[in-house]
Structures are given as structure tokens and as C-alpha cells.
Amino acid sequence: MEKQAILAIGVFLLTYSFIISEKVHRTIVAMIGGIIMLALGVVSQENALHHIDFNTLGLLAGMMIIVAITGETGLFKYVAIVAAKKAKGDPLKILFSLGIITAVSSALLDNVTTVLLMVPVTFSITRQLKVNPEPYLITEIITSNIGGTATLIGDPPNIMIGSAVKELSFMSFINNLAFISVITLLVTLVILLLVYRNQLKTTEELKSGLMSLDEKEELKDKVLLKKSLIVLGLTIIGFFLHQILHLESATVALGGAFVLLLLTSKTDHDLEHAFSRVEWTTIFFFIGLFVVVSGLVETGIISSLAQVAIEFTGGDIKITAILILWLSAIASAFVDNIPFVATMIPMIQDMGTMGIVNLEPLWWSLALGACYGGNGSLIGASANLIVVGLAAQEGTHISFKRFFVIGFPIMLLSVLIATIYVYIRYLTI
């Protein structure tokens, strides 16, 4: 068993180091890491399958299909142009508006999908105003991670936590995380407006050009829009009621996705097109990670780490919660928060078997730390990497350093706000 544990740690560390280096695509790295775990006999294929969280995968895939079909209606471009016109073409007001839209959409859809839809819209607006798109893109990265913190479906770490801990419903996430997410969002947007106030200026002529755009032209298919909004609305209601209905969140999302496909797919091509919009690289990244982490679980490494953490904190819930919050944030800033959370979930579960009775403060600390920590650097969260990739295709390079100078201080302030919140709400009883 000791030999297997050493092999598991070796494969895990090697996988992580390649993910951080970004020299090879992280999906390839995660899948090869998982396959090596199986090939070395650290974990059997049957056990590995038990560790793959199909609820997380189903929820992601279902929401990707729903949002991809809804995106084809032009709804998101319509909303962005309306917001820009409400702001009278003022670049700073537009920054605020796009930040709010990104945060709200990230909470209701998920932040990865939201930034995929927002970035092309942002470029069309910044081209119209002839302003630097970078402040808008950085704002959207940061607000997508903060907005995604508010709900079960908003950010991959929350999806993973909600799937692993059945007692935490969709409403539990809203009750515990929505308020602090709104506070953090408003504080963050004020800071970003102050940072960029002298960089975002345009002419009255260019503002007039933006005001002359007809947002209604963006709504390409009103019948499809109506169907999409009905299904999306019913799906979100399903999330609110999923515990009462005794349905997993993945069942709700996939149910919504396939009802929408039934209503909208007339040919094989329509179906294939919808499936082509699913981010299969993200899905397989999760699969590989679940298998890599299963090696640590099966060999007892995670249990040992949980034991060390409890000895360090003396089992004190206050110290443990704050430690998890800050550890999650700092680690997630430099390691994608998805693999970090995949490692932390079984560790916190093991703490529950070692004497910590009420694990809820630890779960909310993990969610806040991992989601907020994603703003610490460009490699902190999936949404960050997607925005950088889309921006590069449009000829805009966002450097690690320029993002870090803005994102890391905002991340630290966010976690400080979260620390006060966690302490007052959960640890003063």
C-alpha cells in the first residue's frame, strides 16, 4: 500500500505541475494522468468510475446545450447593446453595466458559458467606441468569478461541492453565498471604475454611432427565443425545487437541454450542431481529474492530510474554516480552482469522520475561497483562460502580469470580506 501511495503522489504532483506550466493542454494532461493511475494499478477502472462525478458532468453538459441554443437567438447581444445605450455610450458606465450583466448571467447560467457569450459582444462595443477592450475583459473575468460564487450552478467548484454534499441544495447556496457575492461585486466594481476612470474615453461622435444601433436587429429568431426562454426558466425553477422533487441538479439540466433539443432540432445537423457547442475539453478535463484524485483517496493520502489538518487546528472549527478559506483562495490563484477543489472535497469529508460535527462552515469557506481565489491570476479559473484565448483570437493580448496587478489585490480584498462574513455568520455562535 505504501508503494501505491508513493505512486499516487508522484502521478498527482506530475499532473499538477504540467497543468500549471500550460505547456500541454490541461485536458490532455489530466486524462493522461488518470490513465497512468489506472495503468500503474493505483486504482482499478471500476473504482475510478465510482469516483467520476457524473452529476457535475451532466449539469455542465446540460447547461452548455441550453445556453448554446439560446445564444443563437442573439439574446445576449441584444441585452449588451441595450445596456450600452442605457449608459448613453459612456465607456465607464458601460464597464459597470457589462460587469453587472456578466455577474448575473454567471449566477444563472455558469461563468464559463457566460464569458464565451460576453467576449464577442464586448469586442463589438469597444470597436464601435474605439476604446481599449482589455479593461472590459478583465472586469468580465473578475465579475464572472464573483457572480458565479452566488449559486450552485454558477462556478465549477460550487457544482462539485453541491454534487458531493447532497444536503446542500440550490437554495442553500443562494441563502449562504448570494448576499456576500453581491457585496463583493459592488465593492469590486467601484475599485475597477476608479482604476480605469482615466483610460476609458471616447468622442461624442462615436457615442452617437453606438446609440444609433438597433438592438432589435440582433434578435434573429423570435420563435427560438421564446422556446429557449421558456425552457431556461423552467430549468432554473427546477434547480430551486430539485430537493423537493428528489431530482439531482444534473437531471434537471439534462432534462431542460433535451426538451429544448426536442422543440428546436428539425434535422440531424441541428442536433450535431448543438452537441458541437458542448465544451468537451472541459468535460474530459473533469473526468481525468476525478480519476487522478481517486488515486489519492483510494491509497489513504487524503485521509492522512485531513488528519494532519485537524491536528494542526486542534479540531477548532473557527481556525479550520478560516484556514480552508485562505488556503483555497491562495492555492486557487495559482492552480486552477477545479483540481484544487477536487482534492479538498474528500479531505473535508474525512474531517467529518474525525470529530468535526458541523462541516457546513467548511463547505462555504471552500466555495468562497476557491471561487474568489480564481481572480488571483490568469490561470486561477477556467473562465479566465477562456477569455484570454478568445481575446487572443481578436488580436488582444492580456498578459499575466497586467491581470495579476489588478486581480490579485481584488482577490485579497474579496477574501478579507469573505473572512468577516464567515466569522460573523457561522463562527460566532
Image (cartoon, rainbow, N blue to C red):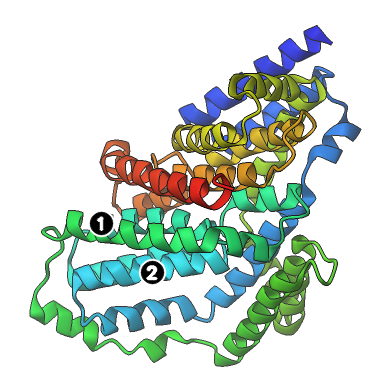
Is disc 2 surrounded by few (<14), some (14 to 19) or many (20+) residues within 10 Å?
A: many
Three-letter amino acid code of the residue under disc 1 = Leu
Residue at image point 57% right, 26% down: 16
Nearest to the observer: residue 336 or residue 280: 336
Residue 100: assigned label: 2
Nearest to the observer: residue 301 or residue 227: 301
Residue at image point 39% right, 43% down: 416
Residue at image point 58% right, 49% down: 426
Tally of numbered tags: 2
Residue at image point 22% right, 61% down: 193
Is disc 1 surrounded by few (<14), some (14 to 19) or many (20+) residues within 10 Å?
A: many
According to the image, label 1 marks what residue?
192
* In the displayed structure image, the side of residue 130 where residue 96 appears, left or right: right
Q: Quadrant of the N terminus?
A: top right
Where residue 122 sits: x, y (%)?
Answer: 33, 67
SS for callout 2: helix
Give the mark, 2 or 1, whose residue is nearer the N terminus.
2
